[in-house]
Amino acid sequence: MKDALQNALTSIVTFVPKLVGFILILLIGLFIAKAIANDLAPKLNGGWGFVTRPSRTPSADRASPLVVRASAPAAGRPEE
């Protein structure tokens, strides 16, 4: 009985530092991920010129991506 209790206590004592190390590494990873997310999110939401979400209906002042509007006559063709 004494050996069984000694083995259980030894197992617990060797497990606790591993658990503390695991939790510490997990918290450091979480901290780094949040720091990266907080630094990158503003840049992705407009800091680098990305549009957050384009409108589904084109407005009169904005050209639709499917419509090609020429502002100059085509090369080699006379203007009518």
Image (tube, rainbow, N blue to C red):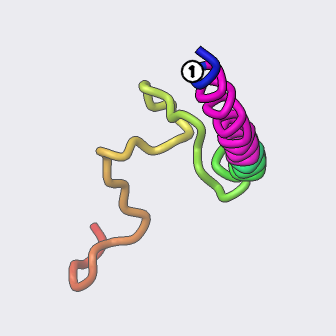
- Can residue 19 be seen from the camera position used here? yes
Asked where in the image residue 18 lies, by quadrant, the reply is top right
Q: Which residue is mark 1?
A: 4
Circle 1 — which element? helix
Tell me the quarter of the image containing the C terminus.
Answer: bottom left
Q: What amino acid is at disc 1? A: Ala
Magenta segment, which residues?
A: 5-30
Using residue 39 as the reference point, say whether residue 60 is left or right of it.
left
Residue 61 percent location from the top left of the image: 56, 39
Q: Residue at x 71, y 44 (%)?
A: 21
Residue 79 percent location from the top left of the image: 30, 72
Q: Is residue 22 magenta?
A: yes
Residue 7 position (above or below residue 24): above
Q: Nearer the viewer, residue 12 or 69?
A: 12
Q: Residue at x 67, y 28 (%)?
A: 12
Q: Nearer the viewer, residue 39 or 59?
A: 39
Q: Nearer the viewer, residue 18 or 7?
A: 7
Residue 51 position (above or below residue 78): above
Tell me the quarter of the image containing the N terminus.
Answer: top right
Asked where in the image residue 31 lies, by quadrant, the reply is top right
Residue 51 percent location from the top left of the image: 58, 44
Q: Residue at x 57, y 21 (%)?
A: 4
Q: Is residue 9 magenta?
A: yes
Asked where in the image residue 70 lies, by quadrant, the reply is bottom left
- Can residue 42 be seen from the camera position used here? no
